[in-house]
Image (cartoon, rainbow, N blue to C red):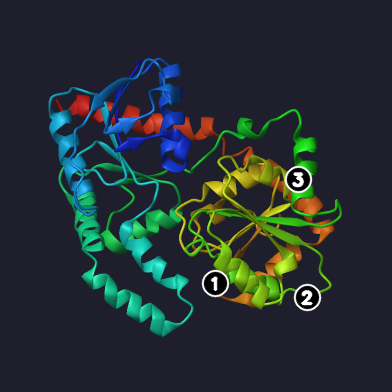
Amino acid sequence: MTPLDIALCYESVLPSRGGAETYLGDLARRLAADGHAVHLYSCRWDAAALPASMTFHPLDVPRGPRFLRPWRFGNACVAALKRAGHDVTVGFDKTWGQDVLYPQGGLHAASREHNLRKFRHPLARRIASWTKHFDLASASFARLERKQYLSEPRPVVVVNSDMVARHFAHYYGVGPEQLRVIRSAIDPGRFAVPDLAERRARERAAWGLTDDTPAGLFVAMNYRLKGLAPLIRAVAAVPKDRRFKIAVVGHPKFEAYRRLAASLGVADRLHFAGFRADPKDAYFAADFLVHPTFYDPCSLVALEALACGLPVVTTQYNGAAELLTVPDNGLVVSDPHDAAELGGAIARMADLGYLRAASESASRAAQAWTFERHYAALLGVFEGVRAAKRRAR
């Protein structure tokens, strides 16, 4: 393949913050390693975490209200790209006008609806839905989303799950001719360490675990959206004779959830580990992942868990559920609020016989979703865009 000239547009690229910014750094380094010319249009970045060959295009965007910032950054990108002649331009998150848009966080319209599911009671959901009508940021993002995907010329849209593809069809009538489903992926090499056994033992000791006690793991920063409260209620529904403990890693503020666990009599079944800049050792210490999310386009924690040989309990609202073979390497529940259903899945994971076979299956599954496979598919999209632009000249 002739090297591509590629522009990546993202407001802030600080890979140490994780998520999309880590992904963008990984992608930029892989593109540069193949000899492609990579440009970044951004307001701030960590050059040390990005390829030395990358060309940076600083965009000066006034701060102002939260709901106006995406509009200002998007306008700045459009203006800057007009003066360039890149083969392919790629927008992440809330931008428009690029050849390819890759909304790793899914659709705002879908996220808004799914966010209401985190409320247990229908009345609370109705009140939350009603208050959204007065939320300037939500209204602004909805309008911006229509501009992104429905303006001409239509962009090629990369989505990371069939679930998100269905959302595009449902909310905006965007069909398969405009969409490309490319599964999310991670680099399993990040978890290849020579002292895994020592790390596992040290972490499990901190959790107060013996070798024969199955350990679950919950990893998230947004405890409410990712279903920590329903998880705690589900733990209370697991029979008392089933031995296990679940470690909670993520946001440092967890006291309200610890109190909930105490009130339900399951404080001894949970360990609140707090924030970890790198949760790698938590994966090593665990035997399974529990991720009862209300919305995840394709959860990276599920992929990280599989890479570490951990079977996964998640929900139908997670695009990563599509990567599981149920029940070989995971279980999918229909409603995080259904304590009996989620508790039953946890009880299944706490069975040592099931865990041994499921762990092997999880490791095999992870090999199918490598970053190289993801990268090759994405590069095919970029090459197709360049070819189409050349034919149009």
Q: Which mark is residue 360?
A: 3
Question: Could you tell me which secondary element the residue under label 1 belongs to?
Answer: loop
Mark 3 or mark 1, whichever is nearer to me = 1
Q: Nearer the viewer, residue 235 or 89?
A: 235
Assess disc 2: are there few (<14), some (14-19) or many (≥20) residues with their C-alpha within 10 Å of its C-alpha: few
Find residue 239 and name its label: 2
Work out whether mark 1 precedes mark 2 in sequence or the reverse, and give the earlier one: 2
Number of marks in the image? 3
Q: Secondary structure at mark 2?
A: loop
Q: Are marks 3 and 1 in contact (CB under 8 Å)?
A: no
Q: Which residue is mark 1?
A: 335
Residue 321 image point, x, y percent: 56, 56
Which is in the foreground here, disc 3 or disc 2? 2
Q: For the residue marked with disc 2, what is the amino acid?
A: Pro
Distance in Å between CA atoms under marks 3 and 1: 27 Å
Q: Nearer the viewer, residue 44 or 80?
A: 44
Evaluate if marks 1 and 2 touch, with contact meaning CB atoms under 8 Å apart.
Answer: no
